[in-house]
Amino acid sequence: MTSLTRGIHHIGLTVQYLERSAHFFTQVLGWQEVKRNPDYPAIYVTDGDILLTLWQVQTDAPTSFDRKTQVGLHHLALKVDSAEKLDEIFELLITEQLKVEFPPKPVCQGPEKHMMCYEPSGIRIEIFWPG
């Protein structure tokens, strides 16, 4: 059967800290901000391939996602072009004092490598080098 869809147009993420989350993508990972929607509010960011829409949560007491007990986004995996880029991002995360679940390490026996971190609103992000 031929797929009726083709790729991802965008991924929408609800975030608690809109500006801090946008900073993570634009200033730490080097993405570009492409649009703002002050009425929601929302900020749209892209790496040139992926478009993320970051939507401000609409409550003062948001519930954090638990990947082990709730249905939803387990993590967002972003690809890098080299092991050196993976290490560079790790160092930036440390400099920015962002939570790192584990540092760059091989996936199974390699040569692939990955790391896991959290953007400021608590969304789990995997940075993946396919080897």
Image (cartoon, helix red, strand yellow):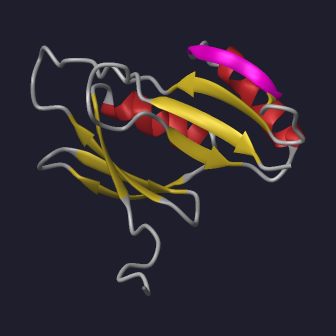
In the image, residue 62 above or below residue 4:
above
Judged from this view, the residue extending furthest toward the front is 1
In the image, residue 107 above or below residue 77:
above
Lateral position of residue 106 relative to residue 31, left or right: right
Horizontal and vertical percent position of residue 68: 37, 20
Q: Assess whether residue 104 is covered by the magenta stretch.
A: yes
Q: Residue at x 63, y 41 (%)?
A: 29
Residue 44 visible from this viewpoint: yes
Lateral position of residue 56 relative to residue 117, left or right: left
Task: Give the image quarter of residue 36.
Answer: bottom left
Horizontal and vertical percent position of residue 28: 62, 35
Residue 28 visible from this viewpoint: no
Main SS of residues in magenta: strand
Horizontal and vertical percent position of residue 120: 44, 23
Q: Residue at x 37, y 24 (%)?
A: 67
Please report the bounds of the magenta region as a residue range: 99-105
Q: Residue at x 74, y 25 (%)?
A: 90
Judged from this view, the residue extending furthest toward the bottom is 2
